[in-house]
Amino acid sequence: MHCQRQDPMRDARRYRLPDAWTVDEVQRIVEAAGRLDWIRAPIGPIPAGQWWRALLLVDYWTGLRVGALLGIRRSEIDLESAEIRIGQRGGPTPPEVPVRLGRDALSAVRAIWEPERELLFVTKRPPSMHRQFGLILDLAGVSAGKGRGRSQFEKWRQTAITHASMVPRSTHRFRNID
């Protein structure tokens, strides 16, 4: 019987590496988002920098798509346990999946927390959201990558998923950005 050697790179060539930002770039993006207060008007009653910082950090820890992220209800968040209980939103997420937030994301959520408000992020989609994220990337000195607009948010999500996959399951999701 003849044993044929397989090319170890054969399977690796079938998969693309994700287009993701580095940890340093993520830190610069979050810091730049916090500086938006000086440039942009508030989003609802929340200063733009606080809103964007909370949005990006919660997304970093959860890996949610933008629509699901903007639909997070205050009732789905437990500030004491630092968990968000993410329910089914038409995607592949099983009902009521608890996701633990890091200290950085929890602090950002507390900064925009308003007990009377139903949605955490005030609005379903602020005007010029994609342009504002592009501005944050410019302020951070970070390349948007292959595309602009929607692909920037997909790259942010892919970055979160990529970073989470690099740590063992026994450790916390990743490390705090702050």
Image (spheres, rainbow, N blue to C red):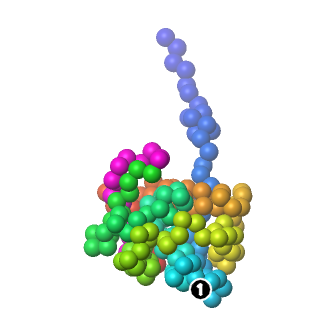
For badge 1, the amino acid type reads Asp
Q: Position of residue 177 (x, y in %)?
A: 47, 74
Q: Is residue 101 magenta?
A: yes
The relative height of residue 88 versus residue 156 in the rendered view (above or below) is: above
Residue 176 vs 46, above or below: the answer is above
What is the tally of numbered marks visible in this picture?
A: 1
Residue plotted at (63% across, 88% down): 38
Report x, y in % for residue 51.
52, 77
Q: Is residue 163 above or below residue 34?
A: above
- Give the main secondary structure, helix, strand or loop, of the magenta stretch: loop
Toward the top, the furthest residue is 1
Report the side of 136 relative to 89 (left or right): right
Tell me: 88 left or right of 143. left
> Is 172 placed above or below 135 here?
above
Q: Residues within 10 Å of mark 1 (few under 14, many from 20)?
A: some
Q: Nearer the viewer, residue 17 or 1?
A: 17
- Depth order, front residue of 83/146: 83
User: Residue beneath label 1, please?
Assistant: 37
Q: Is residue 61 magenta?
A: no
Can residue 116 be seen in this snapshot?
A: yes
| Residue interval drawn in magenta | 90-104
Identity of the residue drawn at 56% across and 27% down:
6
Question: For residue 36, which quarter of the picture?
Answer: bottom right
Residue lying furthest left? 80
